[in-house]
Image (cartoon, helix red, strand yellow):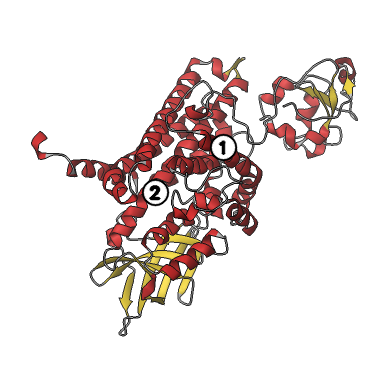
């Protein structure tokens, strides 16, 4: 749809007259702008605007700015050129992008997919509208300020069922209104889960992406699947799904990252056997700063165990500053003689490794979903930029070397999305108990390969964008954010080398001896 501007019309001759000291007008895509009172406020300085006074500045504008900038300054528009129509459409809330490869093939009209049905398409549209309307505006604000996700947004997500959907398929979705009926909770599968994950990534704010309840996604799973105390399970579910309380996963330590067996945090039972006394530290815990519950990996007398620890006396959290926004709430946690009821044990004592490893599958899969979708967003932005940026008298897209870079980025994005959909189909047709056995390796390899691809995409994109690809504001914001933060996914949830080794070891474990 065209940009909404006043109905008054002018001729191009009239516009030409407004190139004086006191009056500066110009044209962008047939829309007339009066910037006379805006000269001092222009971020690029007064001189830039005076250079195009009285002219059609369409080419000059799009060589420097994204179309969305015009929406920000629509109040400067005073009318249009008589008899001419705008040629560049303003995006509509929830609308699919028309840029080639900006959407996965299953959302492209001319392509078909065996995996997606009408409920997936309804959810995708509803989730995009919700993201564009509520998540993206806050994400942009919090990414810059470093503040944590607001309770208002959490409440909106809870009411819309978004928090429920982020946990994947299960009974927790039954009877819940999901985005005003976009999908039935009993029909919800891992493709719906993938859609929720990928749509929210489009805000392009990597720190806030984790800050927006990512701790819940990887922590509450343990409660849903391994909590032995039904009353405790019901209470925590209600509090977290309603947004009243926050939860995170606290496994990683300074001495035990991907090597979870090396955990040093201890849990010793009291003489009466009713409590554990927990001592130790956790590091790089997403959302830990503002959470109420900590799903914590501990060392018990004969092995590893997992406990649900509530924020209480002896639990201290401190902010850790990383290379992405502090809105993620990354924390260093100290447990000092924390008293935890034995009923808070998740799974079996000394067999917590099974809880941890089972939980890793969904975590790593969601990270692959997000990485691949962010790669696609970078492809979309780079295609747009290549079409509008003029260098040496030509558009970037007219340069063969740029087309080669774009081809590589597109190929990496499409191949990994296809692999992701194949793995997701297996998840939809395999019991949760079997996924750890048969999909742990494939999911690990997928995540490893996706983050390697992200490295390539980030590198090529920065070369296409130049200095803008290193600037946190303006047109290259998405590229800069991706280039600065893609590395998080290559470490969180298991480092690339560890996951690659896991994938090969699992394959060899099931390799028949007869083929040797």
How far is disc 2 from disc 1 in space, using C-alphas?
Answer: 23 Å
Q: Is residue 103 left or right of residue 52?
A: left
Disc 2 and disc 1 in contact, CB within 8 angstroms: no
Which quarter of the figure is the N terminus placed in? top right
Q: How many marks?
A: 2
Which is nearer the N-term, disc 2 or disc 1?
1
Q: Quadrant of the C terminus?
A: top left
Disc 2 versus disc 1: nearer the observer: 1
Residue at 79 percent across and 30 percent down: it is 4
Going 78% across and 24% down the picture, which residue do you hit?
51
Q: Which residue is drawn at 53% across and 48% down?
A: 209
Between 404 and 18, which is closer to the camera in this rendering?
404
Disc marking residue 122: 1
Q: In which quarter of the image is residue 264?
A: bottom left
In the orientation shown, which residue stands out farthest toward the bottom?
A: 272
Of residues 491 and 299, which is closer to you in this image? 299
Residue 276 position, x and y percent, is 35, 76
Residue 178's disc is none
Residue 362 numbered mark, or none: 2
* Residue 257 in sight: yes
Q: Position of residue 467 (x, y in %)?
A: 57, 32
Other-residue count near label 1 (Cα within 10 Å), few / some / many at <14 / 14–19 / ≥20: some
Find numbered disc 1 in the image and state the secondary structure of the residue it sits on: helix
- The location of residue 35, given as percent across then percent down, is 83, 32
Q: Which of 27 and 202 is in front in this view?
A: 202
Residue found at x 32% / y 71%: 266
Judged from the image, the secondary structure of the residue bearing numbered disc 2 is helix
Image location of residue 189, percent across then percent down: 44, 43
Residue 452 is at least partly visible in this image: no
137 in relation to 106, above or below = below
* Neighbourhood count class around disc 2 (C-alpha, 10 Å): few under 14, some 14–19, many 20 upward: many
Q: Is residue 373 left or right of residue 277?
A: right
């Amino acid at each position: 749809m065209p940009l909404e501007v006043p109905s008054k019309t002018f001729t191009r001759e009239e516009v030409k007259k407004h190139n004086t000291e006191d009056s500066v007008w110009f044209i962008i895509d047939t829309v007339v702008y009066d910037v006379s009172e805006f000269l001092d406020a222009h971020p690029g300085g007064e001189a830039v605007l005076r250079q195009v006074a009285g002219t059609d500045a369409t080419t000059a504008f799009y060589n420097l700015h994204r179309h969305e900038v015009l929406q920000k300054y629509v109040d400067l528009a005073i009318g249009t050129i008589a008899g001419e129509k705008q040629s560049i459409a303003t995006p509509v809330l929830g609308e699919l992008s028309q840029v080639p490869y900006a959407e996965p093939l299953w959302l492209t009209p001319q392509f078909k997919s065996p995996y997606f049905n009408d409920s997936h398409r309804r959810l995708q549209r509803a989730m995009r509208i919700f993201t564009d309307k509520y998540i993206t505006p806050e994400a942009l604000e919090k990414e810059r300020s470093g503040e944590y996700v607001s309770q208002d947004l959490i409440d909106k997500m809870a009411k819309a069922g978004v928090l429920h959907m982020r946990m994947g398929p299960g009974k927790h979705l039954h009877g819940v209104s999901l985005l005003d009926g976009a999908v039935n909770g009993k029909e919800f599968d891992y493709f719906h889960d993938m859609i929720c994950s990928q749509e929210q990534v489009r805000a392009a704010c990597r720190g806030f992406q984790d800050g927006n309840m990512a701790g819940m996604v990887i922590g509450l799973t343990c409660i849903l699947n391994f909590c032995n105390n039904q009353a405790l399970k019901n209470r925590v579910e209600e509090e977290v799904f309603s947004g009243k309380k926050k939860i995170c996963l606290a496994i990683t330590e300074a001495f035990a990252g991907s090597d979870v067996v090396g955990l040093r945090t201890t849990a010793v039972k009291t003489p009466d056997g009713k409590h554990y006394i927990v001592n130790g530290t956790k590091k790089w815990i997403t959302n830990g700063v503002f959470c109420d519950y900590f799903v914590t990996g501990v060392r018990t007398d004969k092995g590893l165990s997992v406990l649900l620890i509530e924020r209480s006396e002896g639990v201290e959290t401190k902010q850790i500053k990383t290379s992405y926004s502090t809105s993620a709430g990354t924390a260093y946690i100290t447990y000092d003689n924390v008293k935890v009821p034995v009923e808070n044990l998740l799974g079996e004592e000394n067999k917590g490794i099974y809880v941890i490893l089972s939980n890793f599958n969904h975590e790593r899969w969601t990270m692959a979903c997000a990485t691949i979708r962010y790669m696609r967003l970078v492809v979309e932005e780079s295609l747009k930029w290549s079409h509008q940026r003029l260098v040496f008298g030509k558009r970037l897209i007219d340069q063969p070397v740029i087309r080669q870079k774009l081809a590589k980025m597109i190929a990496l994005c499409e191949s990994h999305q296809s692999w992701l959909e194949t793995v997701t189909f297996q998840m939809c047709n395999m019991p949760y108990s079997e996924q750890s056995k048969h999909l742990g390796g494939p999911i690990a390899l997928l995540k490893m390969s996706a983050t390697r691809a992200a490295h390539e995409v980030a590198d090529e994109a920065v070369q296409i964008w130049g200095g803008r690809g290193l600037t946190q504001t303006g047109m290259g914001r998405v590229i800069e954010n991706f280039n600065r933060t893609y590395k998080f996914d290559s470490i969180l949830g298991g480092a690339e080398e560890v996951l690659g080794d896991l994938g090969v070891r699992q394959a060899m474990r099931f390799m028949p001896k007869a083929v040797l």
